[in-house]
Image (cartoon, rainbow, N blue to C red):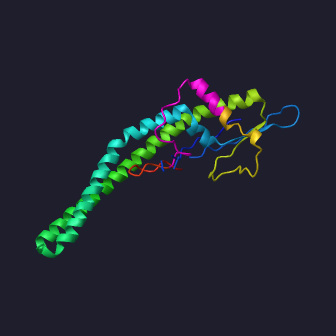
Amino acid sequence: MKRVAILAAVVASGFALGAAAQTPAVSATAGAPKVGVIAFQAAVTATNEFQRDFGDLQKKFEPQRSQLKGLSDEVDSLTKQLQSQSASLSDGDRAAKAKALDDKKKQAQRIAEDAQNDYQQAMQETFGKVAQKVDDVLNNYAKEQGFTVVIDASEGQQQAPLVLYAAPSSDITKPVVDAYNAKSGVPAPPVEAPAPNAPKAAPKAAPKAPSK
C-alpha cells in the first residue's frame, strides 16, 4: 500500500493543516480481507515530532504576532484620536491624521500578508515532513499486522474514500502513532497549547495554516 501524495493543510486555528490522499493496493492474502481505518491527518499531528516542531513554529512566528499586535494597537489609538479630536482639528491636521492612520493600516496589512504566506509555507513543510515518515511507518505496520487495505478516514477530506462506518476495533490510528513515536525516539513535548486537529488553523495574530 502506497500513498500517492502527502498534502499539508492545517493547525489555525487555526493554525488549515492538508489531507493525505491514498490509493490502497489490495494484496493477495489468504482468508478474509483485513481492513484498517486511520485518521491520517490526526495521526500526523498527534506524533511527538509534529507537536515538537509545531511548538517551535509558534515560537518562530511570535515576533510577527507581537509586531502585528503593536500595529493593531496603534491603529486603534489613531482611530480614537481622529474621532475624538476631529471637531477641534484644522482641515490640515485632520487630513494628516487620516493619512497617518491609512498608512498604518496599509503597513499592518502588508506585514500580515507576508507573515501569512511565510507561515503557510512553513506549516506545509512541517506537516509534510512528518506525514511522509508516518506514511512509511503505516505501510510497515499494515504489512506486519496483515492488513489487506487501510482506509484514510480523516475528517473533512474532499477526496474518496469516504468511510460511512468503521468498527472501533478497525481504527489503527493510535497504534501507528505509538509505533512512529517509538521509532522516532522524540519524547512528548511539554504541554503548552494543544496541536490542531489538522494543519490549517493559526493563532489570532498568526496566519492560517496551509490548505491545498
Residue 42 magenta-highlighted: no
Q: Quadrant of residue 149?
A: top right
On the rendered image, what quadrant is the N terminus found in?
top right
Q: Where's residue 61, x and y in %?
A: 37, 42
Q: Is residue 61 left or right of residue 51?
A: left
Q: Nearer the viewer, residue 33 or 170?
A: 170
Q: Is residue 146 above or below residue 72?
A: above
Q: Is residue 80 above or below residue 119?
A: below
Q: Where's residue 56, x and y in %?
A: 42, 35
Q: Is residue 66 above or below residue 28?
A: below
Residue 187 magenta-highlighted: yes
Q: Is residue 92 above or below residue 46?
A: below
Q: Main secondary structure of the magenta part?
A: loop
Q: Quadrant of residue 171?
A: top right
Residue 82 visible at all? yes
Residue 5 visible at all? no
Residue in view at x 75 percent, y 52 percent: 164
Q: Nearer the viewer, residue 161 or 202?
A: 202
Among all residues in the image, which is located at the extreme bottom? 87
User: In this picture, which residue range is highlighted in magenta?
Assistant: 176-200
